[in-house]
Amino acid sequence: MRISEIFSSLQGEGKYTGYPTTFIRLSNCPFSCSYCDTPQAKTLGKKMTIERVMSQVSKLGNMHVCITGGEPLLQEETLSLVYELLSYSYIVSIETSGLVPI
């Protein structure tokens, strides 16, 4: 996977607003959406395995995880990462532009 950053913060949107959340910001977004607030997601980012992502998520200690970008659904491994997170009982959300159908 191509990762821009993995960090802990409070969720600021949606059903889990205010919850401590681990954000996995994916990179390499080819779109130029006018509303994009993460231009750093357009860069290539760092290549990481799902196992390495899971290790960093585990270290941050939050049960809520938000996969964001860029456009997270463009990366082939995103759904595999979601299933892996769910298998460890994480609560997962995906922030998407809606440009890629599931």
Image: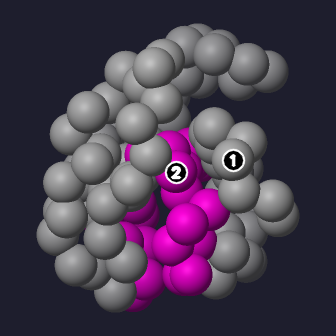
Q: Is residue 20 left or right of residue 87?
A: left
Percent x, y of residue 77: 54, 81
**Label 2: how many Cα within 10 Å (few below 14, some 14–19, many 20+):** many
CA distance separating discs 2 and 1? 8 Å
Q: Is residue 42 magenta?
A: no
Q: Does label 2 or label 1 sit earlier along the sequence?
A: 2
Percent x, y of residue 83: 72, 77
Q: Is residue 33 left or right of residue 82?
A: left
Q: Could you tell me which quadrant the C terminus lies in?
A: bottom right
Secondary element at tag 2: loop
- Image: magenta residue range: 50-78
Judged by depth in the image, the label closer to the viewer, 2 or 1, is 1
Question: What amino acid type should be assigned to the residue bearing mark 2?
Answer: Glu
Question: What amino acid type should be assigned to the residue bearing mark 1?
Answer: Leu
Q: Residue at x 48, y 30 (%)?
A: 33
Q: Could you tell me which quadrant the N terminus lies in?
A: bottom left
The residue tagged 1 is 99
Q: Is residue 70 above or below residue 79?
A: above
Q: Is there any visible trace of residue 64 in the rendered image?
A: no
Percent x, y of residue 49: 34, 86
- Pick the front one: 1 or 91: 1
Q: Is residue 80 above or below residue 65?
A: below
Secondary element at tag 1: loop
- Pick the front one: 28 or 31: 31
Q: Residue at x 37, y 21 (%)?
A: 37
Give the quadrant of residue 7. Answer: top left
The residue tagged 2 is 71
Q: Is residue 58 magenta?
A: yes
Residues at badges 2 and 1 in contact (C-beta under 8 Å)?
yes
